[in-house]
Amino acid sequence: MKRFLSILLAAIILSFNRPDLSIAEGIAREGTTEDDAAIEAVAEEGPQGNPAPIELSPTTYRLGGFPRAAALSDIDSDGNLDLVVTTPEKHGFTILSGKGGGTFEIGKDYPYPIEGYPLSIISADIDGDSTTDLVVLDSYGKVRTFLNKGDGTFSPGRAYPVEDYSFSISASDVNRDGAIDLIVLSANTHTILLNDGKGGFDTILSYPGGVNSPAKITADLNDDARYDMIIGNQEGVSVLLNNGNETFASGVAYPTGKMPVAAAMGDLDSDNEDDLIVANYLDHTITILRSNGDGTFQGPINYPSGKGPNSITLGDIDGDEDEDMIVTNGMSGDVTVFINNTVRPLEVLTDSLPQGRRGSFYETRLEAKGGVPPYNWAVVSGSLPPTLHLDPSTGGVVSLSKEHGEGIASEGEVEGEMAHGENMGEPLPSMDPPCYCLKAPTGLYRFTVQVADSAANRANVDLSIEVLPQPGTVSGKISYLGEKNGKIWIGLWPLSRARSMESFIGPMYTATMDTPGEYKIENIYPEAYRAGAFLDINGDGRRGGDEPYGTFTPKGSGGEPQTTVVDGNGAEVTGIDIELK
C-alpha cells in the first residue's frame, strides 16, 4: 500500500472538491482558451538577464456547450497530434483532427453512452495494440474506456465504478508490469485500476484519504529530487518547497487572476526550466509564471482567454520542439490552441566533427537551433585544416582544392596552427583534373566556430578535426620453385618489430594466397616496413623452421632485407617481390 500511495503523491492530479473546477498536475496536462489575435508579452527580468518574450499565437475553435477537459495524442496515426475535448452537455467528446503546422479540423461529436458528465479524459495505449485509446471519467463515478479501432475511430469498452463525483484521472504503470494503469482521485478516496494487459481493469484498489481543499499540484521545482507543492487560492498560488524532512517551508505567494482552477508545468520559454501556467476561471485569463530554476518564479504575465478557462494541455503541436498550449473555455464553449512562437536561445547543436582522411573528399554540416534564422557561420579562433572551407550561410564544411576554394572561406576566419600531430610534409600538390579532396598535413586542428542569427544573437562552440593520413598499397610477386604445398602468408612489419619476421610473429598487416603469383595488401597506414612471406605447409599459421621463407631483398641489397616505405599520400608501392626458399 505504501508503494501505491507514494506513486499517487507523485503522479496524480490534485484539485478542488468541486468537480468542474480542478487544478491539474503537470504530469496530467489538460486544456484552456484564448482570443484569435496574436499575443506577445515580455517577462520581467530574471536572474539570467532579460529573457526573450513569450509569444503565443492563438486560434479558437468553437465547439458549443461546456468544454471541460482535453487530451492531446495522435489518434489516427498520421503523424499529427489530434485533440480530444470532452463535451459534458452532450455526454460525449469531440475529436479535432490535427492537420499539421499546429492547425486542427473539427470532426464529429461522439455521443457515446456516458451517463454522467465527462469531467476528465486521458489518452493512452491501454490494450497494447500500439494505437491510442481514450479513458473518460464521468460525474456518476464511472471510468469508461474507448478502444481505438486503428483508423481513428473508437468502440466503447467497459465502464468501471469508482466513487461518485471523482474529479481527476491519470495514467501510470503503477505495478510496473508494462501495462498502463489508471489512478482516480475523489474527495474521499484514491482508487487504482490495475490493467490486465489487454485493456481490462477488473482489479480495483481503493485507499482512504481523498483530496480536500485547497487545490494542489506537486512538482520538483528546485531540482533537489523532492516534490514541492503549489497551492491555489482565490486570486493566486502559493509555492511551498519541500524541506526533505516531511515538512514544507512557508509558502511564497504569487498573484494570478481570480479563481485559479487549472494549472500545468511546462517549459514555455525553452530555458530547460518548467514554468507554471494557471487558468483563471472568473477573470478569463491565463497567467504564466516563468521559473527561475531555484523554486522561485518571476512576476505574472497575463494573457486574455475565452470565458471560463478550465483546463490546460501542453504539447508540441506544430513540431518545432517547443511546448504549445491548449485551453478549454467552459463559459464560451470553445477551445483555443496557442502556438508557441517564443524565440528559443540560440545554441550550436554540433559538438564534434568526423575525422578526415588526407587525399579523400570531406563533407559535413554544422547544426544550430533557436534564435532568429537565417544563421551566419564563421571560424573565430584557430583555423580549419587547409583546403577545408566553411560555408557561412549553410554551415557546411567541405574540402575544395586551392584553386577552387579561394574566396569561399567564411568571414572572420583566423589563421592558426594545428594543435598537434606529425606533419607529413607540404599539402598535396594540385592534380589535373582538380582533386576536391582534403590535402592538409595530418594532425589535430582545433578551432572555434561562431553562429550568429538575424537578431545579432551569437553562440560559440569549440571543435576539432583530426586529419588522418591516406593509406597506401603494397604489391608485388611471390615466387617459389620448390615442390612443397601449402598456403602462402605475406606480412608487413614496422621496423620496431622486424626482428620477429623470420618466425612470422606479430606482422601489422597480412595477406594469404594459395599459389605463388601477384599479391596486393591495401589500406596500409603510412610507416616504414619490412616485408616477408612463408609457405605454411602444416596449416597452423605459424612458421616452422623447415617451412620455406623469404624477405624483400632486391638485387643490389647484398641479401639483406630492405625497407618498404608507405608515404601517407595514398600511393601504391609496387615491386615488393619475395622469393621463398
Image: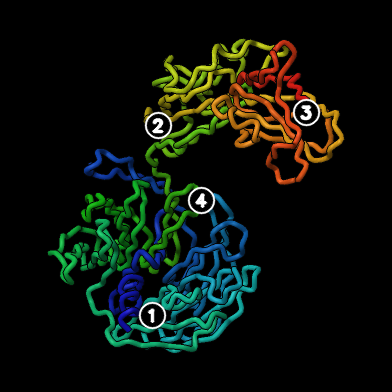
Q: Amino acid at mark 4?
A: Asp
Residue type for callout 3: Lys
Residue type for callout 2: Val
Closer to the N terminus: mark 2 or mark 4? 4
Point out which mark residue 461 bears.
Answer: 2
**Residue 437 visible to an observer of this rendering:** no
> In the figure, 265 relative to 493: above or below?
below
Q: Please tell me how crowded label 2 is: few (under 14), some (14-19), or many (20+) other residues with Cα within 10 Å.
A: some
Image coordinates of residue 512 in percent, x first then y, are: 75, 37
Q: Is residue 272 left or right of residue 335?
A: left
Secondary structure, mark 1, is strand
Reply above or below: 549 against 69.
above
Residue in the picture at 65% in, 35% down: 504
| Disc 3 to disc 1: CB gap under 8 Å | no
* CA separation in Å, label 3 and label 1: 88 Å
Q: Which mark is residue 512?
A: none
Residue at x-position 42% and y-position 71%: 68
